[in-house]
Each structure stands twice: as structure tokens, then as C-alpha cells.
């Protein structure tokens, strides 16, 4: 067994509470945002339409935005304004359950021995949204170049196929497939839970991806407390995979760090396209979704989400269908929404604070943090040059300098200092004694650079 | 369902709990053994310069910030740390206004004229100290003796600090000073520059808490030791042993508390090593061939000036940048 060594970063004591998974009472009203990290989707339904569970309700003309399916049968109540998880202004489709509508599965269900192109199509149709900030969705990230080529040949000309041709690094072979069972951030245990409890699905899912990618090497990254577990043994034997164990440092689980630690390859920025270096990472949450959707034709689209009542150190693991609004979960836990001070989707280090309780749990969310206590605030105090941030930055940057460049609008200078390589892990802000909002400044800098590129 | 009362802020949503004031209050805690060691060997008189220096530092900060209309930051503890450190470098027998003046200058000139805490390119303590030292040489060249109960008598083999003895009486005389006395601090000198053990205890605390980087003290002491080792091996009749030098005078205080002052050190690991190394070597150069008794303050001030230059050595970011069309 290998150990995953992360240079710098920060060790957090793992005190995993015993968590039992509970099912959330089925919501009557589901909310589906029509945008994700990869782009926008266009609604295929309008208000008043009847929709069946499994039906595609929004899709994109671009191949790198996975489509959206409803998990319940019912009617389209309304289309509302709602920010995406990443807080971009967008729309959402609201569906209300109705018993008299039957489900219409539109998934391509395949067998375990399906051909690579069939697997490719099935994953594409499944519409899998993922938690991590990948450059490409699952099927495009993992597929061998021949498979994409074959699909293009089969499909004839269209705008969709044309943009498929333009996927960057489409011709790179995938040599290594990394299965990520490391929890994304401190105080988050969803992935290790899924790995420990659902190893059959993980094995089945990895087999599909091995076929799709043609990767010669498969590495399974597991947290140290699961190194000797039954699941690890099972996965190792069934897949002939190498196992790599994390020593519990954050951010070992983030794609660029994991790839560097396991293969020694540095990713390219800002695209963070892992095809470039011939590696594909997939986490166990996505694998579970994948197997349910394409092998089991299971349309309930249930995801596991961890709910942290952060102020009180209380943690829950819940299962709910994709589209369950945060408000429903708050009600389920018998909390008073008016007493909440902060709602964060995506975890304490990497998540986004939301103000609208209609935002739903989707495949993009692993942790929902709810605070009903006093909130910590970052402020724009000057840097005291203590060097704490330099000591922890896993990308070997000098966050103090980069954030200062961004503060004074010297964005081009920030590029030279490595702003694109910042993976927004948040450690620099976490340790800064001046409480500087480093990640906010760096994100602002990246946005300004993006805008400058678009204009020119 | 919008809830305007919910707080919106960018990630991360948690914090380690470090703050500027906690940083300085913990530094004060680390200075406690030094102060106690001083009281033990020299009596409560050592508190006098400390008190006046703290009054000067805090007073100057409050008055300045009020005068230019800034919010008063004196509660962050940085001025108090400057005051205590400066007080530890001044003999109790100098007039009260000397530490006070030094602290006022140290807080105003390098720090507040350049924007406040952490914006000082030069050590506040050392600038304050250097100004009074250069201006009032005769008054400052004045060192207390440890309490007679510890076996030192006036007219004995040491009645001024060991480095001074070395300067005037040569290598042979200092051989008589037991290492134990150097370590414990049972020698004449100011409270901050005598007890190696007390300073090391405080320094160790800072290291373990992560308040100071290991690179600076390690390179400082290591650099000074190796540099002196070479000369001592070449000519032991002319140069004192590296062990003597490491355990004498400002060396430990310089390595752990003065050279590591926030704002004055480089931020990156390699530059920090070079910075420490430079401090160590310059200290020994001044001690061996300079006119001043101790080389630490001027070595550190010189390296303060070089720190931004050293920090230009690039730290290679992980990951590659692709050419953007
Ligand atoms: S600069 Fe970026 S990568 Fe480095 S610690 Fe800060 S957020 Fe993480
Ligand atoms: S941690 Fe904060 S105060 Fe310290 S160097 Fe980095 S940005 Fe400056």
C-alpha cells in the first residue's frame, strides 16, 4: 500500500462520529436548478406539464453539460429564479409530486458487459452531476480517445458533435484511473461512508470506467481509517487495483493534489483538464450514482448528503432525492429556519453560502452546513507578513502576495505569482491571523482575468 | 424562499482561531521566562526599563493613531511586545527616559510611519534600541551584576558582560567563565541577553506553536556556529570558541525573538534560511572584527534591509500554466 503524501497542507484530527444514515421523508416539491459548474441547461418543459420520474426536464446543446432529470413524477409547478450552487444567477424548475403521472425512464440501461461506446452513451444520458471541480463531466473525462471518436462517427454531424470534437486534449489516452474515496474536507465523511457501505456498487462502477477508459492502472485512494477495512480488501481483490492511503492531511482529496501525489504529474491550469496528463479521477459518490442510473435503471436519484449543525457539532447523514430543497431538510431535522444564521452547501472549506432556502441538494453537494450561532467574519485588514499562509499552501504559492496583487488590481502580476494554480482550498484564509479573505480576493482576480481574456 | 438574514460570505466558512492579538499575546507568554530569569538573577529592578518601554510604546501608538484618525490597535499587543523586548535590552540603572524614548522611536519610525503592525521593514525593537544606543553611548554602556548571592563579586573575573570581557581581555580570560553560568544567565548584562535557557524556553514555545518559522533560528544559530568554528579551528588563540559565542550575549534572543519579528523576515522557506544564515554570519563578523560589543542588533537590522530582496527568490508553484489562446 502506498501512502499519499501531501506537501504542506494541514493535518486535521479525524474524529469521525458514528453516523447512521437516515432517509428524509419524501419531499412533495423538488427544485432543479438549470445550471451547474459546467454551464447552463435549457428547460424542456413548461409550467403545468406533467413529467414522469426519470424524464429529462432540461438539457444543453453542448456535450459537457450533463442533462437534468426529475426524480419524481408530477407536474411542473413553476420556473423560478434561483442561483446555481456556485451562486450564478439562474433559473430552476419546480416540480410537485402527483400520483397520477407514471414514470418514463429515458435512461439507456446497459449490462455489465456493454461495449465502451454504450457505456459512454449511458453515462452521458444519466446526467451525473459531481461534487468536485472537474474540468469535464464524467464521460468526457474518462473516455478513451477511440471511444469518443467512435461515438462521433456513429452520430453524424450536429452542433453537439462539433463541440465534442473540440474538447481539449480529446486525443490523450487515459493511463491512470484514480478512484477517490477520500473525504473532501475536514468534518466531512460522506465518501468514506459510501466506500465502506457500498463497495459492490463501487466495484461495478469502476469496472465500467476501466472499460470506458482503457486505463492500464487503477489506484484507489482511501482514508487511513479504512485502510484495513473489508471494503478496501474487496475493492482491491475485485479490481486488481493499487490502494493508496491518505495520512489525513487536507486537501489530499482535491484533484490536482491527488494526481500529483499518486502519479507525480502536475496538472495544467487554469483549465485543470486532467486528460492533458492522461489521468482521470472519479469519486465514490459519482460511482454510486453512476451504477444506480446505468446498471440498475434506478430513477429515484437518491444521494447521500451530510448535514452539519456546525455551531453545535451535530452531524447527520441523510439520503434524499436529487432536487430536495434545503428547506425540506431543515424541516425534517425540526430546525427553525428563522434561527439560522448561515447556510453553506458544499462544506466548511469549499462550499458556498446561500440565502435562498429553495436551493436543492444535487449531485454537486456533499455537505450541507447549517449554523444557528455567531458567524466568523473575514475582514480586509492588512497582512502582517507572518508567513502562516505560505507554510500551508498545498500548491506552494505565496497567498499573501497573490491576494495583495488582487486587492490592488494588479491581476497580470498575480498570474506570474501563480494565481491560476490556486485550487481555492481555503487553508490560507483559515490560518491567517489578520483574517484576510484570501480566497475571495483570488476568486475576484481570476474573474477579472477571465473577463480581460473575453474582451480581448 | 429567500432569507435575507442569512450571512453570505465566501469560503472558507471556518477559521483556525488565530488572530493578530493572539499572536502577540502568545509572544508575550513566551517572554515570561526571560523576564522571570531576569528578576531571579538581577532583582526586581529589571522591571523598571520594561515598564517604561511599554509605557512609551503603548503611549506612542495610542497618541499617533488618535492623531491621524486611525482606529486604535493597541490591544493587539504588538506595542507591548516591542516594549517588553526593548526593556529587556536596557540596563535597570539607566535613566527612565532612555527606554521610554527608545520605545517611542521604535514604535513610530519603523512601524507607524510605514502603515502599522506588520508593515515595518525594520525591527521596531532594534531601531528603538539602536537610536538610544548610538545617541547615549556612555549611558547605555552600563550593565548590572547578578545578585551577589550567585557568587559573582565586583572586581572578580567578570564585572562586565562576557563579550565585553572578550573584547578587552582576550580569549584566555573568557575561558574561565563556566558554560553553566552562560546557560543560566549568571553573568553581567541586561536581562534579555544573559540567560540562554530562559530565552530558549520561550523560543521553543514560539516554535512549537508555529508562531515563528524554524528556518530563521536554526539558520541563525547554525550559521554563526559554523562560521566561528572555521576561524576558531584556524586560530584558537585569536578567536573564541563557537560554543562560547552561541551561548553569549544577544545570540539566542536575536535568533528567536528579534530576527523573527513579523514584517521584517522573508516569507518563503529558502529566503528565510538565507536570511537566518546572513544574520548569523554578520553577527560573527561584527563580533570578531567590529567595534561594537555584540553583532546581533546590527546584523539583524542589515538583514532586515535585505529581506525583501531575498524574498524575490521565486517559490515554484506546483502545476503548470497552459498557454491561453
Ligand atoms: S492560495 Fe489557494 S491553494 Fe494556496 S492555500 Fe490559499 S486557497 Fe489554497
Ligand atoms: S497568513 Fe495572513 S497575515 Fe500572515 S502572511 Fe499570510 S496573508 Fe499575511
Image: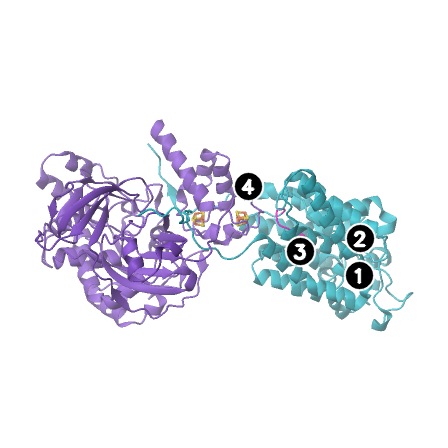
Q: Which chain is purple?
A: A
- Where residue A381 sits, quadrant-wise, is top right
Pick whichever of labels 4 and 2 is earlier in the sequence. 2
Could you tell me if the residues under marks 3 and 2 are in contact, i.e. CB atoms within 8 Å? no
Per the image, the residue denoted by label 1 is B46
| Residue closest to the eye, B273 or A22 | A22
Q: Respond whether the residues carrying marks 3 and 2 are from the same subunit.
A: yes
**Residue bounds of the magenta highlight:** B257-264
- Residue in the image at 61% along x and 63% along y: B205
Give the vertical position of A441 relative to A213 (above or below): above
Q: Main secondary structure of the magenta part?
A: loop
Numbered label attached to residue B312: 4
Could you tell me if the residues under marks 4 and 3 are in contact, i.e. CB atoms within 8 Å? no
SS assignment at label 4: loop
Residue A39 is a magenta residue: no
The chain letter under disc 2 is B
User: In 3D space, how far apart are the residues under numbered discs 4 and 3 (Cα atoms)?
Assistant: 24 Å
User: In 3D space, how far apart are the residues under numbered discs 1 and 3 (Cα atoms)?
Assistant: 18 Å
Per the image, the residue denoted by label 3 is B257
Q: The cyan chain is which one?
A: B
The chain letter under disc 3 is B
Q: Which quadrant of the figure contains the C terminus of chain A?
A: top left
Whether disc 4's CB lies below 8 Å from ligand 2 is answered no
Crowding at label 1, few (<14), some or many (≥20) Cα neighbours within 10 Å? many
Closer mark to the observer between disc 2 and disc 1? 1
Q: Relative to residue A214, is residue A226 drawn left or right?
A: right
The chain letter under disc 1 is B
Per the image, the residue denoted by label 2 is B293
Residue B263 is a magenta residue: yes
Pick whichever of labels 4 and 1 is earlier in the sequence. 1
Amino acid at each position: 500500500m502506498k501512502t499519499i503524501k501531501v506537501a504542506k497542507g494541514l493535518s486535521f484530527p479525524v474524529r469521525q462520529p458514528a453516523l447512521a444514515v437516515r432517509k428524509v421523508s419524501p419531499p412533495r416539491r423538488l427544485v432543479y436548478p438549470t445550471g451547474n459548474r459546467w454551464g447552463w441547461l435549457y428547460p424542456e418543459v413548461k409550467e403545468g406539464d406533467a413529467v414522469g420520474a426519470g424524464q429529462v426536464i432540461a438539457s444543453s446543446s453542448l456535450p459537457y453539460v450533463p442533462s437534468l432529470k426529475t426524480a419524481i413524477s408530477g407536474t411542473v409547478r413553476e420556473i423560478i429564479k434561483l442561483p446555481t450552487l456556485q451562486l450564478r444567477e439562474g433559473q430552476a424548475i419546480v416540480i410537485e409530486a402527483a400520483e397520477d403521472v407514471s414514470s418514463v425512464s429515458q435512461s439507456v440501461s446497459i449490462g455489465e458487459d456493454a461495449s465502451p461506446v454504450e457505456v459512454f452513451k449511458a453515462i452521458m444520458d444519466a446526467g451525473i452531476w459531481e461534487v468536485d471541480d472537474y474540468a469535464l463531466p464524467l464521460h468526457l473525462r474518462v473516455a478513451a480517445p477511440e471511444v469518443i471518436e467512435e461515438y462521433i462517427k456513429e452520430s453524424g454531424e450536429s452542433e453537439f458533435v462539433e463541440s465534442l470534437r473540440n474538447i481539449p486534449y480529446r486525443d490523450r489516452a487515459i493511463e491512470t484511473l484514480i478512484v477517490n474515496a477520500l473525504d473532501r474536507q475536514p468534518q466531512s465523511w460522506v465518501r468514506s461512508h459510501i466506500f465502506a457501505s457500498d463497495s459492490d456498487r463501487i466495484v461495478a462502477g469502476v469496472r465500467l470506467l476501466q472499460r470506458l477508459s482503457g486505463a492500464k492502472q487503477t489506484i484507489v485512494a482511501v482514508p487511513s481509517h479504512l485502510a484495513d477495512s473489508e471494503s478496501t480488501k474487496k475493492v482491491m481483490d475485485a479490481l486488481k487495483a493499487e490502494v493508496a492511503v491518505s495520512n489525513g492531511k487536507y486537501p489530499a482529496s482535491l484533484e490536482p493534489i491527488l494526481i500529483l501525489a499518486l502519479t507525480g504529474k502536475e496538472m495544467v491550469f487554469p483549465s485543470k483538464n486532467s486528460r492533458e496528463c492522461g489521468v482521470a479521477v472519479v469519486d465514490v459518490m459519482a460511482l454510486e450514482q453512476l451504477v444506480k442510473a446505468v446498471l440498475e435503471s434506478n430513477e429515484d436519484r437518491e444521494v447521500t448528503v451530510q448535514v452539519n449543525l456546525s455551531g453545535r457539532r451535530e452531524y447527520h447523514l441523510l439520503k434524499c432525492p436529487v432536487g430536495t430543497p434545503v428547506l425540506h431538510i431543515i424541516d425534517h431535522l425540526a430546525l427553525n429556519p428563522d434561527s439560522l444564521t448561515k447556510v453553506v452547501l458544499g462544506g466548511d472549506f469549499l462550499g458556498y453560502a446561500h440565502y435562498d432556502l429553495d436551493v436543492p441538494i444535487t449531485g454537486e453537494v456533499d455537505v450541507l452546513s447549517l449554523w444557528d450561532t455567531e458567524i466568523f467574519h473575514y475582514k480586509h485588514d492588512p497582512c502582517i507578513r507572518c508567513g502562516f499562509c505560505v507554510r500551508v499552501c498545498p500548491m506552494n504559492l505565496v497567498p499573501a502576495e497573490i491576494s495583495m496583487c488582487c486587492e490592488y488590481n494588479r491581476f497580470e502580476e498575480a498570474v506570474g505569482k501563480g494565481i491560476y494554480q490556486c485550487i481555492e482550498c481555503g487553508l490560507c484564509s483559515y490560518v491567517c491571523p489578520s483574517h484576510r479573505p484570501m480566497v475571495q480576493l483570488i476568486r475576484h482576480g481570476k474573474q477579472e482575468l477571465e473577463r480581460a481574456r473575453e474582451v480581448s | 424562499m429567500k432569507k435575507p438574514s442569512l450571512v453570505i460570505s465566501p469560503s472558507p466558512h471556518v477559521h483556525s482561531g488565530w488572530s493578530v492579538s493572539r499572536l502577540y499575546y502568545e509572544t508575550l507568554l513566551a517572554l515570561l521566562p526571560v523576564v522571570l530569569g531576569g528578576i531571579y538573577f538581577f532583582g526586581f529592578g529589571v522591571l523598571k526599563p520594561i515598564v517604561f518601554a511599554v509605557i512609551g510604546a503603548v503611549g506612542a501608538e495610542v497618541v499617533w493613531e488618535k492623531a491621524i484618525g486611525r482606529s486604535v490597535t493597541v490591544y493587539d499587543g504588538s506595542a507591548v511586545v516591542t516594549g517588553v523586548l526593548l526593556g529587556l535590552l536596557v540596563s535597570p540603572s539607566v535613566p527612565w527616559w532612555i527606554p521610554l524614548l527608545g520605545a517611542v522611536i521604535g514604535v513610530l519610525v519603523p512601524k507607524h510611519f510605514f502603515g502599522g503592525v506588520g508593515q515595518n521593514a525594520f525591527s521596531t525593537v532594534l531601531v528603538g534600541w539602536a537610536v538610544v544606543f548610538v545617541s547615549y553611548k556612555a549611558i547605555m554602556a552600563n550593565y548590572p551584576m547578578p545578585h551577589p548571592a550567585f557568587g559573582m563579586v565586583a572586581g572578580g573575573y567578570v564585572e562586565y558582560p562576557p563579550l565585553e570581557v572578550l573584547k578587552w581581555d582576550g580569549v584566555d580570560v573568557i575561558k574561565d567563565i563556566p558554560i553553566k553560568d552562560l546557560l543560566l544567565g549568571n553573568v553581567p548584562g541586561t536581562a534579555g541577553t544573559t540567560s540562554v535557557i530562559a530565552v530558549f524556553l520561550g523560543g521553543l514555545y514560539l516554535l512549537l506553536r508555529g508562531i515563528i518559522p524554524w528556518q530563521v533560528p536554526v539558520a541563525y544559530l547554525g550559521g554563526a556556529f559554523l562560521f566561528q568554528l572555521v576561524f576558531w579551528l584556524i586560530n584558537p588563540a585569536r578567536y573564541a570558541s563557537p560554543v562560547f559565542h552561541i551561548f553569549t550575549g544577544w545570540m539566542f534572543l536575536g535568533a528567536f525573538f528579534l530576527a523573527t519579528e513579523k514584517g521584517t523576515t522573508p516569507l518563503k522557506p529558502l529566503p528565510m534560511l538565507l536570511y537566518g544564515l546572513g544574520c548569523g554570519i554578520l553577527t560573527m563578523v561584527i563580533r570578531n572584527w567590529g567595534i561594537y560589543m555584540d553583532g546581533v542588533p546590527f546584523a539583524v537590522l542589515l538583514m532586515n534591509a535585505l529581506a525583501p530582496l531575498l524574498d524575490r527568490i521565486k517559490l515554484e508553484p506546483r502545476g503548470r500554466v497552459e498557454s491561453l489562446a
